[in-house]
Image (tube, rainbow, N blue to C red):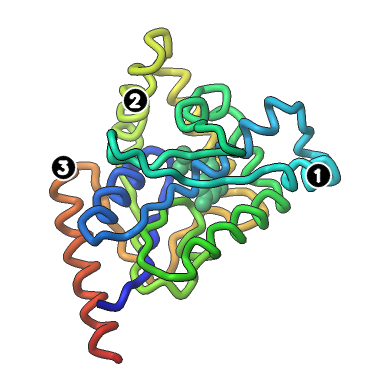
Amino acid sequence: MRKIIITIDGFSSCGKSTLAQQLARKLNYVFIDSGAMYRAITLFFLRNHVDWNNSEEVVKALEQINLDFHYNLETGKSEMVMNGEDVEYLIRDMLVAEKVSEVAAVKEVREFAVKEQRKMGKKKGIVMDGRDIGTTVFPKAELKIFMVADPVIRVERRYREMLEKNPNVLLEEVKDNLQMRDYIDSNREFSPLRQAKDAFVLDNSKLTTEEQLKIALKLAKEKIATVEEAI
Ligand code: DC
């Protein structure tokens, strides 16, 4: 069967990763969470006191970063590994969330991440989620999904997620962080968050994860069939 590239873009906490992961499992594709890469880079910068407004420092730091995804057989999830260290848990911290949009807006950081992401898509058969995957990373992807959800629901989702890790987290804090990231992600100079013209818009405000998977799976199967026919 011919493999395709599926991109899932949208604002934070729209459920992109959940859908991308489930879809990849169903199709036997590789799931790539591109946001995890920006988060890992942010963690490296914070730990090593890299000033991301200084391009020379940024370039030097990026040379020392090696990013990889490891599949965890126990959890069935893929985990971010930076320079041999599993950083999956650390990159979900509020400290990283507070700075990641700033770091992801840096030109050199984006060039580095996009290059890695394109390498991962060489053999196709991937589902990658992020902000610029259907517009910049894979503008010719066979299937592009743009996810949207009611902002109130997004805040609640992220709050519940953060609460599991930190019982002291405040709803207001989570709301402010999401609003700030939405603003920076959509207004930055280099590949801002945009809906690709040929993307299918999926509003999951009122959908269960099973329902959204069913819709996406149908779209994917239709696309795969079209690609097969064209051979
Ligand atoms: O999907 P996420 O919330 O884990 O992403 C973290 C941050 O990384 C997000 O605020 C914006 C940035 N990001 C990006 O700029 N481009 C991507 N393709 C993915 C994420």
State the CA–CA distance, disc 1 to disc 3: 44 Å
Q: Amino acid at mark 1?
A: Lys
Query: Residue at label 2?
Result: 161
Q: Nearer the viewer, residue 217 or 119?
A: 119
Which residue lies at the image location 31% right of the left edge and 30% below the top edge?
157
Q: Is residue 84 above or below residue 6?
A: above
Lower position in the chain sequence, tag 2 or tag 3 = 2
Q: Quadrant of residue 166?
A: top left
Q: Secondary structure at mark 3?
A: loop
Q: Quadrant of the N terminus?
A: bottom left
**Residue 82 image point, x, y percent:** 58, 38
Q: Mark 1: give few (<14), some (14-19) or many (20+) Cα within 10 Å.
A: few
- Disc on res. 60: 1
Q: Secondary structure at mark 1?
A: helix
Q: Amino acid at mark 3?
A: Thr
- Disc on res. 208: 3
Q: Is residue 4 left or right of residue 64?
A: left
Q: For residue 13, say whether it is visible.
A: yes
Q: Is residue 60 left or right of residue 25?
A: right
Q: Quadrant of the C terminus?
A: bottom left
Q: Mark 3: give few (<14), some (14-19) or many (20+) Cα within 10 Å.
A: few
Which residue lies at the image location 39% right of the left edge and 22% below the top edge?
162
Q: Is residue 91 above or below residue 217?
A: above
Lower position in the chain sequence, tag 1 or tag 3 = 1
Which residue lies at the image location 79% right of the left edge and 33% below the top edge?
51
**Residue 198 image point, x, y percent:** 38, 72
